[in-house]
Image (cartoon, coloured by chain):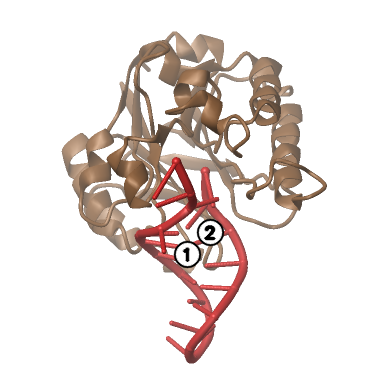
Amino acid sequence: MISVATWNINSVRLRMPQVERFLREQAPDVLCLQEIKCREEQFPYEAFAALGYGHSAVHGQKGYHGVATVSRLPLRELGRHDWQDNGEARHVGVEVAGKLILENVYIPAGGDIPDRSANPKFGQKLDFLERMTRWADTLDRPTLIVGDFNIAPLDCDVYDHKALVKVVSHTPQEVETLARFRDAHGWVDLGREHIPAPGRNYSWWSYRSWWRQKDQGRRLDHAWASPELARQATGHRVVEETRHWDQPSDHVPLITEFDL
DNA sequence: ATGGCTGGTAGAACCAGA
């Protein structure tokens, strides 16, 4: 059995107490982090090693973004894609224990206005997805891709579909672009395999207080597997309680278990 | 109903998140 967690941590250095608690309580074999917000030399390797997570693949940058995969099992780094073609650190790929190809990705948020000409960030988000799609079309090994996709694909993945259909993260253009990525490889959305729609399955709530009070969540974080690997997924859960801890990330972790 | 919150880099207000 191999268990893989993914969590947008919103600054790994600030959030290490929460990460430690999560690893002690949930004990996944592998943890994929997004938004570590530090350079590689600033990453808390020693703290992870002390918890048993001595293997890591870190792709960081100063201040923003950044991803890291830490593991109790040996990792072999496979590479880092720059699907936005602008130097931002948003992906790292590894092989876990010679058994699992694991891609850790942080898809761009996309800014405020869902229009490529008015808002270049929205175009960059779509371009990122289209480059991912071309990459997915070439895959020839069972793969797991996890991370913060910054898209809530189903109507039931947001608290109010009608209210959010023009809000970046839930627009038809993003949902359709993500569907083309899915279809390029036949990815299986494990979150909805194990928690069928319209079951409650949010992974993000704004820090702004009334959003939290009204449970206005969105499902932005995902674990998608190749079809053959998806059949080996034996469990999947959202650890929602972390959103109620002190100084929480605005995202909560997902954990998927595989019979490997 | 409002994204009226949060983190990083600054070294005061910005940018970025989504």
User: Quadrant location of the C terminus of chain A?
Assistant: top left
Closer to the camera in the image, A184 or B4? B4
Which of the chains is red?
A: B
Q: Chain of mark 1?
A: A
Residue A236: percent from left, percent from top = 33, 21
Q: Is residue A180 left or right of residue A109?
A: right
Q: Amino acid at mark 2?
A: Gly
- Identify the residue shown where x is 63% and y is 46%: A80
Q: Chain of mark 2?
A: A
**Mark 1 nearby-residue class (10 Å; few <14, some 14–19, many ≥20):** many
Mark 1 and mark 2 residues within 8 Å of each other at the beta carbon: yes
Residue A60's disc number: 2
Residue A115: percent from left, percent from top = 75, 42
Q: What is chain A's hue in the picture? A: brown
**Mark 2 nearby-residue class (10 Å; few <14, some 14–19, many ≥20):** many
Closer to the camera in the image, A145 or A97? A145
Q: Amino acid at mark 1?
A: Cys
The single residue placed furthest to the right in the displayed view is: A117
Classify residue A46 by image quadrant: bottom left
Classify residue A122 by image quadrant: top right
- Identify the residue shown where x is 69% and y is 57%: A87
Circle 1 sits on which residue?
A: A38
Residue A100: percent from left, percent from top = 47, 26
Whole-Å distance between the Cαs marked 1 and 2?
A: 6 Å
Closer to the camera in the image, A3 or A52? A3
Residue A6: percent from left, percent from top = 40, 37
- Identify the residue shown where x is 70% and y is 41%: A114
